[in-house]
Amino acid sequence: MKARALLWLWIGLIACEARPVARPSPAAIDKQAMFGSASLVPTREGERARRELAIAGELEQALDRLELGPAHVDVELREPAAVIVIARLPEHRSVEQAEAAVAKLASAMIPALLPGDLHVWWQPAIADAPAPARPGSARSWALMMICIGLGLSLGVAGERLRSRW
């Protein structure tokens, strides 16, 4: 009898463990969400925005290959053209070398870009990023106690039925 009660207790503890609920993150409202798809009626504004997105994606990939990434790039082709770059500065490069590489790359991809229209922000390189904290399993103690009580009462009812037959 004690073994069965312990078995039901163990099953109740395992079955009643609350699992974290994955909540959907809100959709980002950015240029990609607005103009990334050409499924709507094409406009000059939409075509310019898609061209900006394509150039920004190419710049991000090129910066990754030059070991200046991961980077975020925003390109504006309106007059005056502007490029905003947020990247990680590697430990083995100086700020001047990295900015010269970014300026050369941006001016090669956007010939109309003036040197004053390139804005670069550097983040320090992170050697070992800490692993994200894993959320602990939150248990509902009331639900667990209900499951234990139900398990015990089912066990007692099962024993009574077995003893009658």
Image: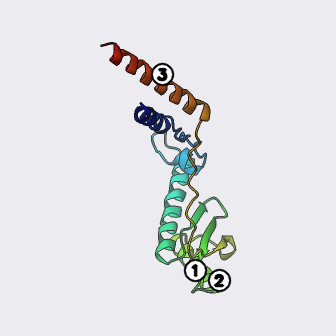
**To which quarter of the image does residue 165 belong?**
top left
N-term-proximal mark, 3 vs 2: 2
Q: Position of residue 124 (x, y in %)?
A: 64, 75
Image mark for residue 153: 3
The residue singled out by tag 2 in the image is 95
Crowdedness near tag 3: few (<14), some (14–19) or many (≥20) residues, C-alpha within 10 Å: some
Which residue type carries mark 3? Ser
Which residue type carries mark 2? Val
Q: Position of residue 87 (x, y in %)?
A: 60, 71
Residue farthest toward the left in the current orientation of the protein: 165
80 w.r.t. 92: above or below: above
Crowdedness near tag 1: few (<14), some (14–19) or many (≥20) residues, C-alpha within 10 Å: some
- The structure residue drawn at horizontal position 63% and vertical position 58%, both measured from the top left corner, is 78
Instruction: Estimate the spatial distance between the alpha carbons at disc 1 and disc 3, rounded to whole Å.
Output: 64 Å
Relative side of 121 to 21, left or right? right
160 w.r.t. 93: above or below: above
Residue farthest toward the top in the current orientation of the protein: 164
Relative side of 155 to 31, left or right? left
Which residue type carries mark 1? Pro
- The structure residue drawn at horizontal position 53% and vertical position 63%, both measured from the top left corner, is 56
Q: Position of residue 93 (x, y in %)?
A: 59, 86
11 w.r.t. 48: above or below: above
Crowdedness near tag 2: few (<14), some (14–19) or many (≥20) residues, C-alpha within 10 Å: few
Instruction: Estimate the spatial distance between the alpha carbons at disc 3 and disc 2, rounded to whole Å.
Output: 71 Å
Mark 1 lies on a secondary structure that is loop
**To which quarter of the image does residue 95 belong?**
bottom right
Mark 2 lies on a secondary structure that is helix
N-term-proximal mark, 1 vs 2: 1
N-term-proximal mark, 1 vs 3: 1
Q: Position of residue 150 (x, y in %)?
A: 49, 24
Q: Of 88 and 3, which appears nearest the observer?
A: 3
